[in-house]
Image: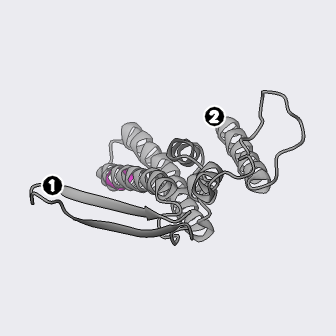
Amino acid sequence: MKNLALTVLAVCAMLLVASATTYGQAPEEDRSSAGTAITPAAGVSPLISDALNRPSGGVALVASAAYPGLGQLLNDAETKAAVIGAAEAFLLARLVLEDRWTRNSYKNYAETGAALWYNEYSEHYDRRQTLIWWVAIVALYSLTDAYVDAHLAGFDDPLPAYLDVVSIGPGSSGDELRVALSVRF
């Protein structure tokens, strides 16, 4: 079981390195239908071309679920990816240790029946349960953060030069909301 866990961890690390090194590179000249990237044609609006270059929320969510911090890395939040990846790795490593200590203490208690081993088992069991909750909370935060950041990418960018004014106000009857967008040609 230990070898399987180390193999899975090594494969995930290789995938992380491979995705980090290939993300943002220009697509190859291969025009086959498999693996070609969408490139905007000449004259396409900057808003559309910028949206095509951003990862989708679903891709960021799945990437974050596959490997801790990968969704944040796809969203160009390297510091956040490092912090979340380190936090999840620490919590998971600590959870594995607590699980090992819990099982060992229970085995010793079952063999000897000593109250000392039962108290140690109880302490490790409680810590393991707490760590399970912390791992779940950090993982859910990571998933949510990757998804929301992908959807909010470019939100603070200034409006393009051809969009003059965006105004929001009450309508003529007072019961409606009017949104106006002025476009310069």
Q: How many marks?
A: 2
Element under label 1?
A: loop
Residue 58 is inside the magenta segment: no
Amino acid type at circle 1 is: Glu
Query: In the image, what residue occupies the spot 58% across and 63% down?
Result: 81
Q: Residue 80, image x and y in percent?
A: 55, 67
Q: State the extent of the magenta-drawn residues as a range.
A: 124-128
Q: Nearer the viewer, residue 18 or 41?
A: 41
Label 1 environment density (alpha carbons within 10 Å; few <14, some 14–19, many ≥20): few
- The image quadrant where one finds the C terminus is bottom right
- The image quadrant where one finds the N terminus is top right
Left or right: 133 with respect to 14?
left
Query: In the image, what residue occupies the spot 34% across and 55% down?
Result: 130
Element under label 2?
A: loop
Left or right: 46 with respect to 124?
right
Amino acid type at circle 2 is: Met
Residue hosting label 1:
176
Residue hosting label 2:
1
Left or right: 115 with respect to 4?
left
Q: Residue 99, image x and y in percent?
A: 46, 47
Location of residue 30 (image quadrant): top right
Residue 125 is inside the magenta segment: yes
Q: Earlier in the sequence, mark 2 or mark 1?
A: 2
Q: For the view shown, which residue lies furthest in the left direction?
A: 174
Label 2 environment density (alpha carbons within 10 Å; few <14, some 14–19, many ≥20): few
